[in-house]
Amino acid sequence: MTAALDKRVIRVGTRGSLLATTQAETVRAAITAAGVETELVIVATAGDKSAAPVQQIGVGVFTAALREALADNTIDVAVHSYKDLPTAQDPRFTVAAIPQREDPRDALVARDGLVLGALPPGATVGTSAPRRIAQLRALGLGLDVRPLRGNLDTRIGKVTSGDLDAVVVARAGLARIDRLDVVTEALEPAQFLPAPAQGALAVECRSDDTDLAAVLAELDDVAARATVTAERALLAELEAGCTAPVGAIAEVVDSLDDDGRVIEELSVRGCAAAVDGSDVVRASAVGSVADAESLGRSVARELLDLGARDLVEVTEPASSPTASSTTTGSGDA
């Protein structure tokens, strides 16, 4: 730690939800453990103040206020759910660390302990993202998919109260607030691809705060950075935002080289889906962990060749028997 940091109290900014503050507290504690004095600062965002769909209030709605607080020196570190960050680089800031990633899969929370395939036709399922809506409809189970906003407790409450038969949320969020007990099924990527960077945190600071960036870099996880880099490169190549019906997952896997030695490679899978569930295109690639960005972009180009461009525009067909007038998202889950 430098003498300059020794004289500072590092202000760690976060949204005010239980999940956001829990995530930020893990980062704050890690910085403190490095010998730096810290405090947690709650920053209100437009996403917290509005119940409108993300498509109306804008991509990056859950991160813009945190970034502005960084820019005006109200905070020194911003902790984001990485999947909420726009893919375009902002030169004012650097993602100094991506800590070890939680399980990126989506999770089903359903009444009576039901799994997805056991839900009867017409069962009501609440979910926050066009990506989830599209993939649920593409399964052809006849589910009544309904848009849903709110924090994790609110969403879980919709099931326990009987308002909905099930909800689909990020497993990582439930893990971080110690609520995995409500999960009735973790949805496997072969069936249901998560959002790019789901389960990962972005620890961001000002680009010119090099002393702090060096301390934060100690929190960086190599595998998390590689997988997130590939998934977000895929999203960027598709020119799709965080609310687009695009799923992706990258995993570090063991492979054998030509001499029979075990090596680590990066497996990348992606999909783009029509929100009405009428079409899903999928692609995959395996290559060097060092080539994470190019692997993600190559999978995206294959998806584009398969017609993904026509699918990533988020539109809700009024004629669909399970359609609603809006689709919504949340920075939490």
Image (cartoon, rainbow, N blue to C red):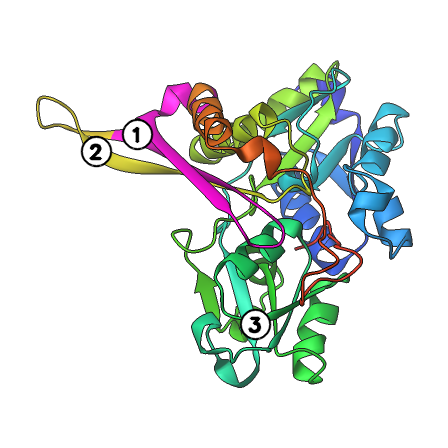
Give the image location of residue 125, x and y in percent: 63, 70
Give me the C-alpha separation between circle 3 and circle 2.
35 Å
Residue in the image at 51% along x and 28% along y: 304
Give the image location of residue 300, x and y in percent: 49, 28
Q: Earlier in the sequence, mark 1 or mark 2?
A: 2
Q: Earlier in the sequence, mark 1 or mark 3?
A: 3
Give me the C-alpha separation between circle 1 and circle 2.
6 Å
* Front in this rendered view, residue 189 or 41: 189
Q: Are marks 3 and 2 in contact (CB under 8 Å)?
A: no
List the single residue furthest toward the left: 259
Q: Give the residue at mark 3.
A: 109
Residue in the image at 71% along x and 77% along y: 157
List the single residue furthest toward the front: 319
Q: Which mark is residue 265?
A: 1
**Bounds of the magenta span?**
264-293
| Residue 244 to residue 292: above or below | below
Give the image location of residue 275, x and y in percent: 63, 51
Q: Helix or strand or loop: what does disc 1 sit on? A: strand
Q: Give the residue at mark 2.
A: 255
